[in-house]
Amino acid sequence: MVSAWIGLGSNMANPAARISGAIDRLGQEPQLTLERVSSFYRTAPLEYLEQADFINAVARVSTILGAEQLLERLVRIETELGRTRNGDRYGPRVIDLDLLLFSDIVLHNADEVPWNGRCSLLHRFSDRGKPCHPLSHYG
């Protein structure tokens, strides 16, 4: 089993309830054990500022899945919860599930990721500090 940290975010139609629903959904997922969930935090949007603030949280899970398999599950859960991808990377989100940390893997750039372009594991914490703020409470 390995530990992974998943970032959750939403800024559309009752975002706190959407994040709670996503947490419940993660807890039902086979081969995942939901271990811990942060408090919810309100954060300002990045890049595209003409949208509502986000509600963000993080969840720690343990899993026997590999990083790519876990990412595929997260994308599937997002779709099941109503997320559509319209190409607007920084636009409003019904739900956003990002793989922030996986085991003890340290990556320095996108070229190191075999599934490059599909994984939020590469979120640069310096640029995305506010959405990743809940993670800082778990040191």
Image (cartoon, rainbow, N blue to C red):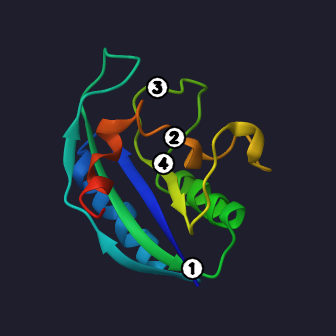
What's the distance in space between the residues labelled 4 and 2, CA to CA? 23 Å
Circle 2: element type: loop
Q: Nearer the viewer, residue 129 or 41?
A: 129
In which quadrant of the rendered view does residue 136 lie? bottom left
Q: Dividing the image into 4 quarters, which one contains the C terminus? A: bottom left
What's the distance in space between the residues labelled 3 and 1, CA to CA? 29 Å
The residue tagged 3 is 90
**Identity of the residue furthest to the right in this view:** 114
- Among numbered discs 2 and 1, the one appearing first in the sequence: 1
The residue tagged 4 is 82
In which quadrant of the rendered view does residue 44 lie? top left
Q: Is residue 70 above or below residue 108?
A: below
- Among numbered discs 3 and 1, the one appearing first in the sequence: 1
- Where is residue 16 drawn, in percent x and y? 23, 51
What's the distance in space between the residues labelled 2 and 1, CA to CA? 21 Å
Query: What type is the residue that disc 1 sits on?
Result: Thr
Q: Nearer the viewer, mark 2 or mark 1?
A: 2
What's the distance in space between the residues labelled 3 and 4, CA to CA? 17 Å
- Where is residue 104 drawn, in percent x and y? 57, 66
Image mark count = 4
- Where is residue 109 drawn, in percent x and y? 67, 38
The residue tagged 2 is 123
- Among numbered discs 4 and 2, the one appearing first in the sequence: 4
Mark 2 Cα shell of 10 Å, populated few (<14), some (14-19), many (≥20): some
The residue tagged 1 is 63
Q: Is residue 50 above or below residue 138?
A: above
- Among numbered discs 2 and 3, the one appearing first in the sequence: 3
Q: Nearer the viewer, mark 3 or mark 1?
A: 1
- Among numbered discs 4 and 1, the one appearing first in the sequence: 1
Q: Nearer the viewer, mark 2 or mark 3?
A: 2
